[in-house]
Image (cartoon, grey):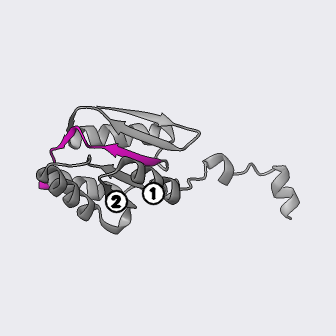
Amino acid sequence: MRWTIYRPEQLVVISGVGIFDISFATAFREAMRAEGAAGFCKLFDFSRLDIKLSDQDLQSMVASTRLAGPVKSGPIALYLGKTPPPLLVDMAILLKNRIGYRRRIRLFTDESVARQWLLYEGPAFNPSQETVLLPPGDRVAKLAR
């Protein structure tokens, strides 16, 4: 499995062959925060992947969405393939339901429709600290007085 960050489009595509498990999810989340891409739209191509998450793994993932702090995450499109196996569908639905309303997340069997939805939803806005924390003598601060 791998991911590619498309900065101009503010999109991350996750694809490949393998297993989506808690270790991959944790590494991915940390990488997105480190890369400044947490707010980007995310397209998970699960068409050639298996989801292997225990109940405890799902609880851990849900807890991490609650503890994300000021960083807002972008929408997630889960592309399952044109004719996904029933177990993949069940696991994707379980993942979506556990994450719940805290995240914009949808399941798709058509990749082009998934991409259109992400384009419509757009990335989350995460102002950088440089924008929020202005130096005391900053020109903008003086103009605001």
Q: Residue furthest bottom?
A: 101
In the picture, the disc for residue 106 is 2
Q: Is residue 132 magenta?
A: no
Local crowd at mark 2 within 10 Å, few (<14), some, or many (≥20)? some
**Front position in the image: 85 or 66:** 85
Q: Residue at 26% x, 46% y: name it.
A: 81
The quarter of the displayed image where residue 90 is located: bottom left
**How many circles with numbers are drawn on the protein?**
2
Q: Residue at 29% x, 52% y: name it.
A: 109
Q: Position of residue 105 (x, y in %)?
A: 36, 59
Q: Secondary structure at mark 1?
A: helix
Residue tagged by mark 1?
117
| Vertical side of 41 occupied by 143: above or below | below
- Earlier sequence position, callout 2 versus callout 1: 2
Cα–Cα span, label 2 and label 1:
9 Å
**Front position in the image: 116 or 73:** 116
User: What residue range appears in magenta?
Assistant: 41-55
Quarter of the image with the N terminus is: top left
Quarter of the image with the C terminus is: bottom right
Residue contact at pointers 2 and 1, CB within 8 angstroms? yes
| Vertical side of 65 occupied by 32: above or below | above
Q: Position of residue 107 (x, y in %)?
A: 30, 57
Locate residue 29 relative to residue 134 in the image: left or right.
left
Tag nearer the camera, 2 or 1: 1
Look at the image and tell me whether residue 74 can be seen. Answer: no
Q: Which amino acid does the dot numbered 1 rest on?
A: Trp
Q: Secondary structure at mark 2?
A: strand
| Vertical side of 56 occupied by 50: above or below | above
